[in-house]
Amino acid sequence: MDNLNPCVKSMEYVLSGPLVTRAAAIEKELEQGAKKPFKEVINAVTGDRQAMGQPPITFTRQVLALVSYPELIKYSNFPDDVKERATFLLTGCSGGSTGSYSEASGVEIVRRRVAEFIEERDGFSSNWQDIILCAGASTGIKAVLKLLDCETSGLKTGVMVPIPHYPLFPAVIAEFNNMQQMNYYLDESNGWAISIKELKRALNDTKGTCKPRALVVVNPGNPTGQVLTKNTIREIINFAYEEGLFLIADEVHQQNIYDNNSEFHSFKKVLMEMGLPYSKMELASFMSSSKGYMGECGMRGGYAEVINLQSGVKAMYLKSISANLCSTVLGQIAMDCVVKPPEPGGSSYKLFVREKNSILKMLTENAKIAVNAFNSIEGMSCNAVQGAVYAFPQIYLPSNAIETAKQKQMHPDEYYASQLLENAGISIVPGSGFGQKDGTYHFRTTILLPSAKLKAMLQILRKFHEDFLKKQQ
Amino acid sequence: MDNLNPCVKSMEYVLSGPLVTRAAAIEKELEQGAKKPFKEVINAVTGDRQAMGQPPITFTRQVLALVSYPELIKYSNFPDDVKERATFLLTGCSGGSTGSYSEASGVEIVRRRVAEFIEERDGFSSNWQDIILCAGASTGIKAVLKLLDCETSGLKTGVMVPIPHYPLFPAVIAEFNNMQQMNYYLDESNGWAISIKELKRALNDTKGTCKPRALVVVNPGNPTGQVLTKNTIREIINFAYEEGLFLIADEVHQQNIYDNNSEFHSFKKVLMEMGLPYSKMELASFMSSSKGYMGECGMRGGYAEVINLQSGVKAMYLKSISANLCSTVLGQIAMDCVVKPPEPGGSSYKLFVREKNSILKMLTENAKIAVNAFNSIEGMSCNAVQGAVYAFPQIYLPSNAIETAKQKQMHPDEYYASQLLENAGISIVPGSGFGQKDGTYHFRTTILLPSAKLKAMLQILRKFHEDFLKKQQ
């Protein structure tokens, strides 16, 4: 243990922490007939739509079946556009097979299609050679941050990360030897907005302790669910330009927007709209097949669009990912279905639209259901979930609950979450795992549960919370 | 560029080097009608069976199709054992879908099956909780080495690596800040054998420059094709025990044995046979869906069996892989088909055996064809290819060829390889990319080409080599 990588030791990752492990254990206990105040564990931890029992998009799965077993293209009656898609994708695979390696950066025709998707989305050109297909956004983010892991005149690389944040970022940063996390706080009182004043505050407070090199923005927000306005994005880009920061935009939830007054604007688009000198800034944007209405988490599809790198740096980036050979080809094909869904007139189109709309309709309802419920519970408040797939309510905890937690050497909201799990069978993630202002307490819940189940969970939670507060009095 | 991760800068990976890039460029030139002394580029670089146009194992692909699109289980006439396998595997996926995340360590029922495979192979028990499913062996190897990336009383971690070696190892080691490669040479004059004398030599020569912590062994050898005898493995284990080294066994080619007098023995098995204290040594063994007769490279299936870790270290290991969420679930399912192929009596059995045998028969022939050809060419010699999927002949290069290379600032065998590519359209990997004794020159060629194509390539190569020698006189 003494000879273990210290970065691995210090790294923390709440989504696989003790509470998640405990929830799994309780499920097994229930299977084995243990008596509990509840019949099942409701898992509200992950942003994993299909784990919640929701069906995948038929088109994607039919394409995956055909590229896995091409005999089906000849001898089955799958829709024409599915057969065409599968046939076309196989022409891009070496030896016409998904069983051969692709280039480290991915299958060229898929990379080209991602570029087309971005062009259509933003109205600005995208170079397919700036597209790197990766196994989910996570590996892509890691590969880009790795480039920045270096000492500059004795100082570690500083990476600005939002608080609260998606826990992947601190986990990855912690694993690098020469990287330091610089926290900037989202403004809960203002719908988790990002303020330039706060970005400057974060920068100044760490002056001299590291060399600020990159700014991470998660839009739509995870766990916070806010969607950035174009104006805010402009201000952020301007700030990053002035400070010479590499922009790292986690935009994996770009297809999950629920609020009628909110719209997704990619950093790439706004950067281009702003023109020179901004349009020449280094930017990495990440997308995944795991989110949106697809929710193909297990397929591990994703892409990074990395623009304006010096050619030498670009070459190093490609070299550094090449030792991993390539990301899963079937995951790349799942990504192809994300960026190029069935088209009007195609035989899969109607079904696709029906499936897509029913999912997004349900999530839009769930977002409202969850937020309204939390705001109607005494001692809870929750900002609107404008996008992404989580709600992040603040919970009021009485002082003696906080005291009890401290005695148990737990974060107060971790203690709350463990009580919720043990007494009500609801598994959520304590806010302390995402970071939060001192003295405030939160938890993250997914809104991906089927609406009926979500409502049931919220009622159980309301009951638990009221009892919890009573007990503490 | 100055602020780029220095480890990334220094890292080298021959399999995506300039020659590979050049080969791809030449292919495009030919497509565009360029006139060359050859009509096609013969790619003999990768160990990618399906890229060479060989079909996959039908059973694997049928299972993948069904778990991708489960409707096929109900409404199609796939073989019963395929339907049963797909149905069973889906019970192990959250929400019964391959689109949901698995645990970071993989789907439990697949991990259990890997353990059964190992027990059957070795005759010793295997704990499914020691099995980590990973996206090909590469990510698994990286994750284990990462644990050892630390400074011990001012010294970097030393990792013993064979020369010649699979280039992944130096690439990975170079990316870690506190790791140093310690080279030990395989004995070409003795069929690329590993001698304990040489291991001790390597250890002594680096005394004081690093803290030796791990010993990497690749068996069957890549690029060298030797298969270790049980006696050699015993000696290696004994050496590792005396020196307190973590054993890292790359055994991805364990199902590729061609020589009648050779047999694959896993390090795990020999360790257990040797009993205490050896059976308590830390060992990581790696397997992949990319090799063997399956050759499912693009699926990115693989596993690591990691035994005898302290529970604390084990926990840190699991934590460190958890931030990547999980490896591709379809890749895990490909791995399931590797460790649990169709069984006698099952409706897929006969076809499977036919497919498997024809592949292994072809590879066995190819191994002989290649070695005989190289040994019959003036100025070339090649050890027997007992296993794996490559031949690694030594080539004699006249002094003026070496001189020309130096003027071009190329390794002599890199110059040879580039000449072979430009004049004969054959793409191979120069030995300098794998490491070799100073003053010796080699190249690696795959033996995965269809036999006819392999023979054609060998004739072109013979002709080129003779002309090359003439020119240099």
Image (cartoon, coloured by chain):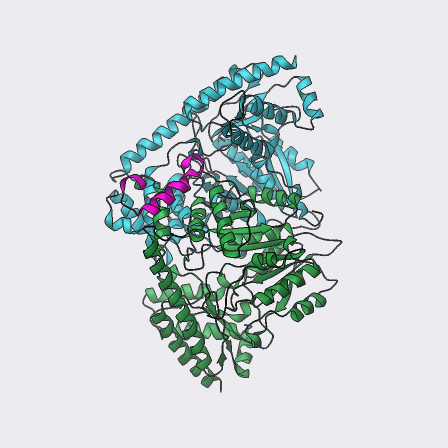
Chain colours: A cyan, B green
Q: Nearer the viewer, residue A54 or A304?
A: A54
Give the percent coordinates (x, y) of residue B7: 61, 56
Give the percent coordinates (x, y) of residue A378: 56, 14
Q: Judge left or right: residue A57 versus residue A171.
A: left
Vertical side of A290 occupied by A447: above or below: above
Whether residue A301 is visible, yes or no, is: no
Vertical side of B411 occupied by B81: above or below: above
Give the percent coordinates (x, y) of residue B237: 63, 61
- List the single residue furthest toward the bottom: B473
Residue B270 shown in magenta = no
Q: Residue A265's quadrant in the figure?
A: top left
* Total numbered circles: 0
Give the percent coordinates (x, y) of residue B210: 71, 60
Vertical side of B64 occupied by A36: above or below: above
Q: Judge left or right: residue B271 versus residue A154.
A: left
The kind of secondary structure the magenta stretch mainly shows is helix
Q: Nearer the viewer, residue A174 or B309?
A: B309
Residue B76 shown in magenta = yes
Whether residue B223 is visible, yes or no, is: yes
Which quadrant would the C terminus of chain A be assigned to in this image?
top right
Q: Judge left or right: residue A276 versus residue A293.
A: right
Q: Judge left or right: residue A210 versus residue B449.
A: right
Range of the magenta residues? B73-100
In percent of the image, x 69 and y 21: which residue is there? A404
